[in-house]
Image (tube, rainbow, N blue to C red):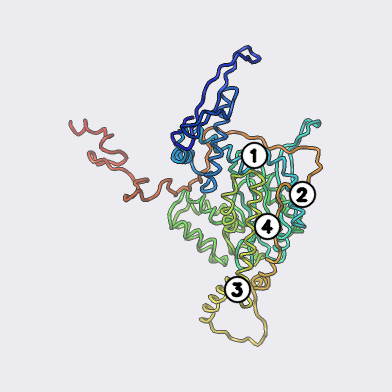
Amino acid sequence: MHALSCSWHAFIKSIKSKQTNKGGLACIYLRLQKKKNKSECWSPITLVKNRDAFYDVKGGRLAEKEIGLWKYNSFSNSNFHHASHLELQYRLGVSNMEAYRAKQIAMKKVVGDNAEEYAKLRDYVLELQKSNPNTTVKLQVEVECNLSSTTRQFKRIYICLGGLKQGFKAIGKELLGLDRSFMKGPYPGQILTAVGVDPNQGIYPLAYAVVEAETTDSWSWFLEILQDDLDLNRDSNFTFITDRQKGIVPAMTRVFPSAEHRFCIRHIYENMKKQWKGQVYKDQLWKCASATTVPQFKKCMDDLKAINKDAYKWLNEIPYHHCSRAHFTGRAHCDVLINNMCEVFNRQLVNGRDKPIILALEYIRGFMRRIMNVQKTISKCHGPLTPTATILLSKVKEEASQFVVQWNGKHDYQNIGYIISYTLACWKVAYEFKVGPVNGQDLWPQHECLYKLKPPVHHTQVGRPKKKKRKAADESSQPLVKGCRLSRSGKTVTCAKCKKKGHNSRSCKGQEERAT
């Protein structure tokens, strides 16, 4: 390692030694020397025994520079970016692989070791329950065949903070959205979330869990604990909205057979547009889903049948009570058709999904600082209803002014909806319950479990790890505009020679036919 700057110089010098190792081979020592200025003598600062150890010394010193760089930027930048910064700032010739190793060492010092975080997970659970009373935490480990083993492998963890549990019950709206998102760290897993709707039509996170995969077993385990937290039973008339993943549908039938299970229309359209693309199919699907009466729904389905019989057959296979507003029971007093509350919540967790397990859980808990922001908004509101409910009621009043009311001699009226859930008083009560802070790791209570928790098995998949979003069927992988020119992706090429489509003039094979 050689530095060109005048601030400091570093060289590597090989020193031969008569000492031998166990194999009888001579040991080679490497000395790292520095010189503050040209007038001073060289002074050794590090003596390492083999060549491989030198890379650890060099990586550690580069990691110190990486930590300083992290204060101003992020570890998420590319290795080339960090190598270029070290070269410009300290005049060091650093390869991309050296920058990668230094970044990993720096991340362990700042963020923590992913494997060691699992050993502290039991202490974190005790501290979380201590600072947040009435909090439910369930930690499950893998079955160990060797009973004499002192370690247990992590499998799942479920968390429902006590303040969020009390606030959700105060809202009184029996509607929950369920969804999942991938963990992006070195160990596999998925985050399962349950998100409700507050009186102002905003998101209200309730519970979250980190599981090994999205399966029927993991969803059943999550729903059974959620069932106990909400004091529900198998015959509860609760309403859930999810996507159509294979794991959650049988789990919902097993745990909540009497509940109303809605499918997100946006996810249905994502599956539909793989075969039938276009705005016509999208608009017609939404007309069918948002129809409020059965005759109106049948008319919309007939219109879809006139457009495309195959699309009609595909949509007709989905049970109507899962995707049609006209066939909903109305028990939830909410006609929501999309699982947007979970999508919004998962979007806030993107930066926390690649962190170690405790930091990832703390990132989710830290998002609950939004309670203070909502309380500031509530303090500025006036009137009996929430701001969103006031706007919706104004639109209904404007439409109702076009009708003429005639009295039939009775004082009866029809009220569709649960008006208490949209009042400003209910909104205040929902956010009166706080999420308590968590002390530093030095102040956590020590668990008395005899088994040490170790991370789950890491299965390295073939190829480069993929962290990018999966593109939809009609979503382009490239931007529509490249510089000042539009992208030609998706267009059919026309040959300038034979005027046929599917190839250009350079790959045209019709020259001989035209010559004859």
Q: Amino acid at mark 1?
A: Asp
**Disc sitting over residue 126 in the figure:** 2
Q: Amino acid at mark 2?
A: Leu
Residue 100 position in % (x across, y down)? 52, 36
Q: Is residue 5 visible?
A: yes
Helix, strand or loop status at disc 4: strand
Helix, strand or loop status at disc 3: loop
Q: Nearer the viewer, residue 79 or 59?
A: 59
Q: Residue at x 30, y 42 (%)?
A: 501
Outermost residue toward the front in this view? 39
**Disc sitting over residue 164 in the figure:** none
Q: Of callouts 1 and 3, which one flags the residue occurring earlier in the amino acid sequence?
A: 1
Q: Amino acid at mark 3?
A: Lys
Taking 342 as reference, is 402 left or right?
left
Quadrant of the rendering where the C terminus is positioned: top left
Q: Amino acid at mark 4?
A: Leu
Taking 209 as reference, is 279 left or right?
left
User: What is the crowding at mark 4: few (fewer than 14 residues within 10 Å), some, or many (at least 20)?
Assistant: many
Between marks 3 and 4, how big is the CA–CA gap? 25 Å
**Residue occupied by mark 1:** 113
User: Image height check: is 170 above or below 403?
Assistant: above
**Disc sitting over residue 206 in the figure:** 4
**Disc sitting over residue 380 in the figure:** 3
Q: Nearer the viewer, mark 2 or mark 4?
A: 2
